[in-house]
Image (cartoon, grey):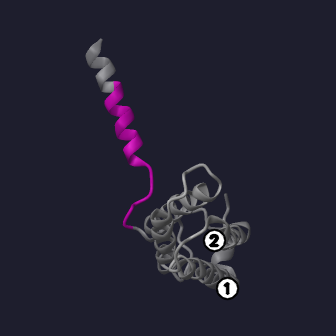
Amino acid sequence: MNAKKLLILAACIGLAACGGVDPNSPLGKRQAIFKDMLRTSEDLGGMLRGRISFDEQRFASGATKLDQLSRQPWQHFPQVQEGDSDSAARDEVWQRQERFQQLVRELEASTGQLASAVQTRPLNAQGVAPLVQKVEDSCEACHKEFRAY
């Protein structure tokens, strides 16, 4: 009986390992960057909304990291659409490249403004909150137009 349970468990683990996205594929690379951006942005927002205590150094580091990350995923969008079914990108990413690139530049500009603002100390949460909101709005604008889910 134990051998049977072990065999079923091994089969389940094996099947779970078969799915997923290749982390070295363009899709896998951009998904990893987007997840890192989300975690970083959530920490910044959490500090501003009181979910996490505001730490000036941690906030500044996060803002700088978010700015660096915001410039990375775009290189992992191939010129032609991939056949990846795990992608959250709509077809419009490839069909409306000019608009997509405009939103990319807007995000990069907003994270750049935030990263510049955190260079001046002391930081105050109320002073940087509108800049974080601008970053969040940039993300949301692109998601509304180009993210499938």
**In the rendered picture of this protein, how many numbered marks are placed on residues?**
2
Residue 85 image position (x, y, % from top left): 56, 59
Residue 19 sits inside the magenta stretch: yes
**Residue interval drawn in magenta:** 8-24
The residue labelled by disc 2 is 128
Q: Quadrant of the C terminus?
A: bottom right
> In the structure shown, which secondary structural element does the residue marked by tag 2 occupy?
helix
Up the image or down, 90 lies above or below 79; here it is above
Q: Residues within 10 Å of mark 2 (few under 14, many from 20)?
A: some
Image coordinates for residue 107, horizontal then vertical, percent: 62, 78
Residue sitting nearer the eye, 111 or 86: 111
Q: Which one is nearer the viewer's eye here, 60 or 27?
A: 60
Q: Main secondary structure of the magenta part?
A: helix
Q: Sort mark 1 into few (<14), some (14-19) or many (20+) by Cα contacts within 10 Å.
A: few
Q: Residue at x 60, y 68 (%)?
A: 124
Q: Nearer the viewer, residue 67 or 1?
A: 67
Q: Position of residue 25 (x, y in %)?
A: 41, 68
Q: Quadrant for the N terminus, please.
A: top left
Q: Residue at x 55, y 51 (%)?
A: 52
Q: Amino acid at mark 2?
A: Val
The answer to which quarter of the image holds residue 101 is bottom right
Q: Earlier in the sequence, mark 2 or mark 1?
A: 1
> Which numbered disc covers residue 102?
1
Residue furthest to the left: 3
**Residue at image point 63% right, 71% down:** 128
